[in-house]
Each structure stands twice: as structure tokens, then as C-alpha cells.
Amino acid sequence: FVKMVHNGIEYGLLQSYGEGFEILNAAVYDLDLGQVAELWRRGSVVRSWLLDLLAAALAKDPELARVKGYVEDSGEGRWTVLSAIDEDVPAPVTALSLFARFASRQEESFSAKVIAALRREFGGHAVRKDEP
């Protein structure tokens, strides 16, 4: 049970690093993400073994071009979320981290299609590609 909760915490940490580095990667600034990871590894409040691993991964593949953004889950995150529900404990970060893994596995989200279609219908918002 303790290991399961540990892995649920890990889900949130991984998600936070992923989101943070995606923001940096998308920024208009010319950032070397490997250098950012190295800088943060030394004395930053977000330093961790996970950041050490990210720095190593970015050193090998700075654009992560050889990595597909498909994230499996081994079950501990699900168990953590279910345990939180059973114990009436709010665990939004763990739950959202689990759901982000599900989203990573979709070629295209049907939910996003529904939202785009609804926005087009109620407000004349453009969609990227009209259905046939």
C-alpha cells in the first residue's frame, strides 16, 4: 500500500516536470532544455533524482526525437486514485496525472472533436478540419 501511494506521488511529479518542460519548449525563447535541467539540478527547489534522469535523457536526445509521447500506467496510479476515493481523500493531482497518461495514448481525442463541433455550432467558432 505504501509503495502504491509512492507511485501515485511519482505520477504527479512526472506530470509536473513534463508540463514545465513543455512550457519551456514552446516558449519564444531559445532555451537549451538540457542546460535548464542541469541548472535546476544544482540547488533548485525542484531538484530531484527524476530531474537528474531528465537531464541525462536530454543529453542523449535534446529534442527527445527518439521518444514517443505514449505513457503507460502500471496500475499503481489507478489503485492510488481508487484508494483516495474509498477514503474520501481529494487527490486531484494524482487523478489528473493518471488521466494525462490516458490522453497520451490517443491518436486523436473524440472528446476534443465533440467540443470543437459544439463550439462551431453554438458560436460559429472555426474547426481545423470540417467533417465530410
Image: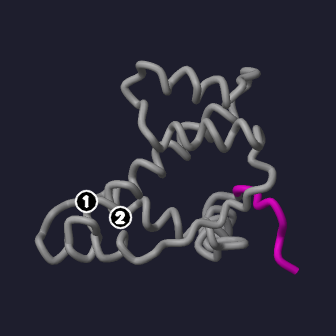
Asked whether residue 29 is drawn in magenta, I would say: no
Quarter of the image for residue 120 reads bottom right
The amino acid type found where label 2 is placed reads Ala
Toward the viewer: 129 or 82? 82
Task: Name the outermost residue toward the bottom.
Answer: 132
Count of labels in the image: 2
> Bounds of the magenta span?
125-132
The amino acid type found where label 1 is placed reads Ala
Residue 42's x, y, as percent? 47, 21
Q: Secondary structure at mark 1?
A: loop
Quadrant location of the C terminus in the rendered image: bottom right
Is the C-beta separation of discs 1 and 2 under 8 Å? Answer: yes
Residue 96's x, y, as percent? 40, 60
Quarter of the image for residue 68 reads bottom right
Q: Is residue 109 above or below residue 120?
A: below
- Mark 2 closeness class: few <14, some 14–19, many ≥20 residues within 10 Å: some
The residue drawn where x is 62% and y is 73% is: 114
Q: Estimate the spatial distance between the alpha carbons at disc 1 and disc 2, rounded to whole Å.
A: 6 Å
Q: Overall secondary structure of the magenta stretch? A: loop
Toward the viewer: 127 or 51? 51
Position of residue 24 in the picture relative to residue 29 (left or right): left
Position of residue 71 in the picture relative to residue 130 (left or right): left
Q: Secondary structure at mark 2?
A: helix
Q: Where does label 2 land, which residue?
A: 95
The residue drawn where x is 55% and y is 20% is: 39
Quarter of the image for residue 29 reads top right
Position of residue 20 in the picture relative to residue 59 (left or right): left
Q: Where does label 1 land, which residue?
A: 91
- Mark 1 closeness class: few <14, some 14–19, many ≥20 residues within 10 Å: some
